[in-house]
Amino acid sequence: MKKWNFKLNSNLKAVSKNIESSLGTVKGLVFNMNHDKNDSITFKMRKRILYAWYLFYINTVIVQGKLSKTAIENETDVEISFNQHFLWKLVIFTDMFVGLAMLITLFSGENSSPYLYLMAVAILAVGVILWIRIQKKYERNMNEYKTMISKVLAI
């Protein structure tokens, strides 16, 4: 999870209306906004995943944000956090767990052929390569959201 904090020289209600009008009507984007009682507004957005294979092609970062009033009249504090989608974490950790479990059973058992070692190492290597690649994709997707939010808020 990575965080992005900044301040805007605008009213809280104007900023929330701007975000809701700009991002609320985008197709393929799930956008929810909640108005709290203590002068803060939270929002959450992510791209909709309709099918499992979309996980590989679309932006899978979940954005959670909070808009809050500051002590100054026309200033809004913006806190945004970027999280990786749960399905990616599940795929990576499952792959690495299966590879490690196969290696552990091969080392502890008597019946072990070189092909089973190769298969276990290959599964583990796929998990590590997938993890490295997904981290790069996460950074790229996070920058896409940052530019989109910057354009909407006109920073």
Image: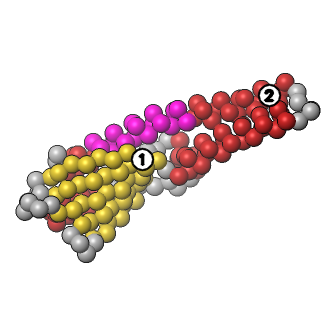
Residue extending farthest to the front is: 108
The amino acid on which the numbered mark 1 sits, given as a three-letter code, is Met
Between the C-alphas of marks 2 and 1, the distance is: 35 Å
Is residue 29 visible in this depiction of the protein? no
Q: Main secondary structure of the magenta part?
A: helix
**Is 143 within the magenta?**
yes
Give x and y (percent) for residue 48.
46, 55
The amino acid on which the numbered mark 2 sits, given as a three-letter code, is Tyr
User: 74 above or below 81?
Assistant: below
The residue located at (23%, 72%) in the rendering is 38
The residue located at (10%, 53%) in the rendering is 9
Q: Toward which corner of the image does residue 118 lie, by quadrant? A: top right
Is residue 123 visible in this depiction of the protein? yes
User: 33 above or below 56?
Assistant: below
User: 108 above or below 18?
Assistant: above
Give x and y (percent) for residue 35.
27, 71
The residue located at (11%, 62%) in the rendering is 71
Q: Toward which corner of the image does residue 124 lie, by quadrant? A: top right
Residue at disc 2, secondary structure: helix
The residue located at (8%, 60%) in the rendering is 72
- Using the image, tell me which numbered label, if any, was put on residue 1: 1
User: What segment is highlighted magenta in the picture?
Assistant: 131-147
Relative to 28, is 5 on the left or the right?
left
Relative to 53, is 148 on the left or the right?
left
Task: Tell me which colouring the rendered structure shows.
Answer: secondary structure
Residue tagged 2:
117
Callout 1 environment at 10 Å: few (<14), some (14 to 19), or many (20+)? Answer: few
Residue extending farthest to the bottom is: 37
Give x and y (percent) for residue 25.
31, 60
Relative to 12, is 82 on the left or the right?
right
Q: Are marks 2 and 1 in contact (CB under 8 Å)?
A: no
